[in-house]
Image (tube, rainbow, N blue to C red):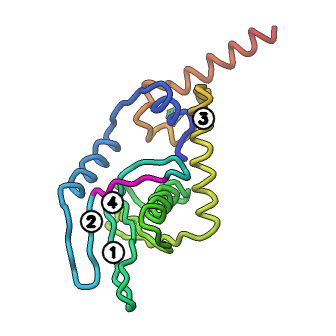
Amino acid sequence: MFCERQCALIHIEQLWSENLFTAEGRIMHDKVDTANREARGKVRIDYGVPLRSLRLGLIGKADAVEFHKRDDGRWIPFPVEYKRGKSKMDNCDRVQLCAQAICLEEMLNVEISEGALFYGQTRRREDVVFDKALRTETEDAAKKVHELIESGITPKAEYSKKCKLCSLLNICLPKVNSKASNYLMRAMEE
Ligand code: SF4
């Protein structure tokens, strides 16, 4: 969702590099992961929950899954993902959370209507509704990522504002690479 080239560099070319943002995020996730389980009245919380969806071909780990007790005695999962920054205009974080909900639905045979994102910078929790549009966007993203990895082709670099946040900036070299590929294209046309 963040960048197809970044996805390809990580999952096709097996490259990785850490920057301040990924290190802060990792430390925040590690802190959440060291907690194990908690119970507060009608809410139980499991941390570091392994996830998978055979239908979408996804595996991962939820930072936390709250289980909310309903009046009929059923415990309904409510995934919570911790993020270091603040709420964003784009849907990247919401799609990630929705993918977690789809995994939990498949694993536990339940319907999950909502979850939440917790942002470390603003200390705010944002509720996310898993509506049809978000579910479609999530399923499309899962399909696209499989197509990308199966193609084995890393998309060419295109520099944009988000590159400044990307931990792979020094590996990707988007400014150099987009100039180089433009030059090669021109040379081939000539
Ligand atoms: S530097 Fe920019 S183009 Fe390159 S992988 Fe990161 S976000 Fe994508």
Asked if disc 1 and disc 2 are in contact, CB closer than 8 Å, the reply is: yes
| Front of the two marks 1 and 3 | 1
Which picture quadrant has residue 19?
top left
Q: Main secondary structure of the magenta part?
A: strand
Q: Name the residue under label 3.
A: 148
* Mark toward the start of the polypeptide (3 vs 2): 2
- In the displayed structure, 122 sits above or below 51; it is below
Nearer the observer: mark 3 or 4; the answer is 3
Q: Looking at the image, which is closer to me, 22 or 7?
A: 7
Q: Position of residue 34 (x, y in %)?
A: 18, 55
Please state the horizontal and vertical placement of residue 38, each as a whole percent of the image. Answer: 20, 71
Left/right placement of residue 179 relative to residue 34 reads right
User: Front-most of 155 and 124?
Assistant: 155
User: CA separation, marks 4 and 1?
Assistant: 25 Å
122 above or below 188? below
Region in magenta: 48-53
Q: Mark 2 — residue?
A: 46
- Inspect the magenta stretch and tell me whether residue 45 lies in it: no
How far apart are labels 2 and 4 at the CA level? Answer: 23 Å
Residue tagged 1: 67
Q: Which amino acid does label 4 sit on?
A: Gln
The residue shown at (37%, 82%) is: 74
Q: Are marks 4 and 1 in contact (CB under 8 Å)?
A: no
Q: Which of 16 and 107 is in front in this view?
A: 107
Identify the residue shown where x is 33% and y is 34%.
Answer: 18
Image depth: mark 2 or mark 4 in front: 2
Is residue 49 covered in magenta? yes
Please state which amino acid type lies under the numbered disc 3: Leu
Return the residue nearer the eye: 41 or 54: 54
* Residue ID for mark 4: 121
